[in-house]
Amino acid sequence: ARSYIPRLNLDGMWIGEFGEHGSELINVTYSGDTLIAAKITGDKHVPRRQVSFTVNLSPNIFLENSTILTPIELSETAASIWGMESLSRYPGKGQIAAKGFKDNRFVDGQLIMFDGYFSFLWNPTKQNIFFTRPSQDLILGMMRDVLSEEDEVDNMRKHLTRCFDKDISEAFVLPKNEKALDPFKRIQRQSDLSAALEEKETKNVDEDLSTHMRKWMTYIDQVINEKKGNNSSSK
């Protein structure tokens, strides 16, 4: 029966627009009747790997004032747009924090179910974020950028650690012939790949033009040489 209940089948990745932070990915899992949404990509306030919000989906859940969150009744116009007469709501807790993940805490919130997607409302801040399923290309692009940034920071941290771990004797050691690794080398971001692809396409166009020019020059040289040969034989 659980497989036929939409609110209990939201597992997997979702994408939402987190205001000034832009698009972020979350991963939804369940622990019993509790929905847990963890950030795959984060921001300066709540970073990745942290819980964004939780929702208690137990059929007997009550709020502190002993009242159930009643569905949101829609007008005829809204109902025709959303394809349903009401929107189910379920109480939850959303995480908020200051920059640097400081003073983080969970505040009251609610999950609002739509047809095929959902939103989560942080009650105190009135921030309501809609979540939809992302495409595979979007997931790969966002994950590449996140991993690239973390990889870059990690490489810089390791490089600085190696610098501080060296003693004065190592300053007089002759360098090895082995090719040194770039301490700031990182996984390429999506923008890097796009720029490289554009550069490659431009290069291919330039090469094609050069090839055509060489062919024309060769043809012209052949024609000139043939004319010279004919003139010499006619004399």
Image (cartoon, grey):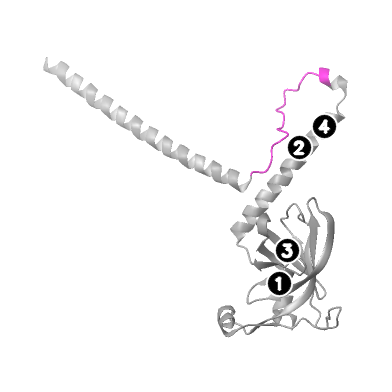
Picture coordinates of residue 210 (x, y %)?
A: 39, 32
> Residue 156 shows which numbered tag?
2
Mark 4 Cα within 10 Å, few/some/many (few <14, many 20+)? few
Work out how far the residue at label 1 is from the one at label 4, CA to CA, in angstroms. 45 Å
Work out how far the residue at label 2 is from the one at label 1, CA to CA, in angstroms. 38 Å
For this view, does 160 lie left or right of residue 227? right
* Disc on the earlier residue, 2 or 4: 2
Check disc 3 and report its element: helix, strand or loop. strand
Labels 2 & 3 near each other (Cβ < 8 A): no
Labels 2 & 4 near each other (Cβ < 8 A): no
Q: Amino acid at mark 2?
A: Met
Check disc 2 and report its element: helix, strand or loop. helix
Magenta-drawn segment: 171-188
Q: Quadrant of residue 62?
A: bottom right
Picture coordinates of residue 113 (x, y %)?
A: 68, 76
Q: Amino acid at mark 4?
A: Arg
